[in-house]
Image: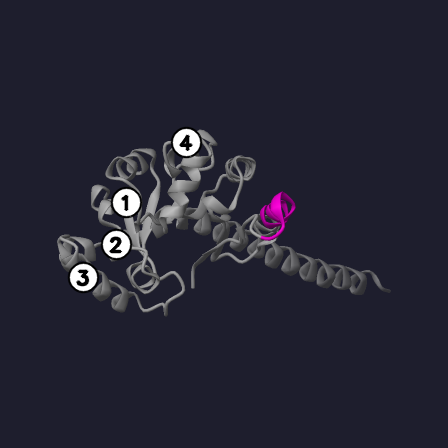
Amino acid sequence: MHAVLCYGATERNGGRAEARLGLAECWRFMESNCRPLVEGVVGLHAAFTVSDETLREAGAIAREYGTVVHLHVAEDRCDVLDAQQRGYSGVIDRLLKTRALPCGSILAHGVHLTADEVRTCAAEGFWLVQNPRSNAKNGVGYAASLRESERVALGTDGFPADMLAEQEALRGEAAQHGDDPERAARRLDAGRLLAAELLPRVEAARAADLSARRLAEIRARAEAAALRLWRRMEEIGEP
C-alpha cells in the first residue's frame, strides 16, 4: 500500500527546540526511508503552534529535499487571529510571506479561510483537504469557502478511514450549508489527483529500489558463476 507520512513539528510544549527536533525527525525519515511505496514529507502540526522561524525552516527543508509541507490551516478561527496578531492579514498571507509552502503543499481543514484565500491557494498550486466528520464533531464550522477551488480533497482527520462514509457525511454537511452535495462529493475523486501528484516520487523511489535490487541479484549471480568458472579451470589445470 502506498503511504505519504510526516511528523507534525510544533512548539506547543518545548518551543523552538521542540520544533527543531520535529523537523529533524522529518529529515531523518526522508533520508533513511528505503520502502519503495512510502514517501516522506515535511510536517507541521498547525500554523498557530509554530513561529515564523519554524515556518521558514520547514519550507527550506522541503525545497532542499524536493518535497512538500503538510499542516493544519484555519481549522479554528484562533489560527486566523494568531496570524493577524503577528501582523499578517491572515494565515495564508503568513504562510506565503514566510515561504513555508512549496507548490503542491497540503493544507488540512481550511474552515475559516476566505474565498480569496482559497483562490490564492489554488493559484499557488496548494491542496486543501476537507474533513467534514472531524469539523462537525469539533464544532469548528463548515468549510464553505472551499467551493472556490477544484484542488480540494477529502480526509478523515483521525476518524476511521472509511472514505465512502466521509463522502456521505460531506454530502449531508454540504446540503445543510448551501453547497451542491454532488459537487462537494467529487472531492473524493480529487483526492486521487492529489495522490497522483505525490506518487511519481514514490514510483521513482520504487524504480530506483528495484534497479538496486536487480543489480544486487545480477552481482550475486555473477560472483557465483565466477566461482564455478575458477573451480572448473582449476580442475582442468590439474595433471
The three-letter code of the residue at mark 1 reads Arg
Q: Nearer the viewer, mark 3 or mark 2?
A: 2
Residue 102 in view? no
Residue 15 lies, with reference to residue 182, above or below; the image says above
Horizontally, residue 81 falls left or right of residue 164, namely: right
Q: Give the mark nearer the N terminus: 4 vs 2.
A: 4
Q: Give the mark nearer the N terminus: 3 vs 4.
A: 4
- Marks 3/1 in contact by CB < 8 Å: the verdict is no
Which mark is drawn over residue 151? Answer: 1
Which residue corresponds to mark 4?
88
- x and y, in percent, of residue 74 in the image: 37, 46
Magenta highlight: main SS: helix
**Region in magenta:** 13-24
- Marks 4/1 in contact by CB < 8 Å: the verdict is no
Which mark is drawn over residue 132? Answer: none
- Disc 3 from disc 2: Cα separation: 12 Å
- Disc 4 from disc 1: Cα separation: 24 Å
Q: Give the mark nearer the N terminus: 4 vs 1.
A: 4
Q: Residues within 10 Å of mark 3 (few under 14, many from 20)?
A: many
Which residue corresponds to mark 2?
142
Residue in view at x 52 percent, y 43 percent = 50
Residue 25 or residue 140, whichever sits in front:
140
Which residue corresponds to mark 3?
171
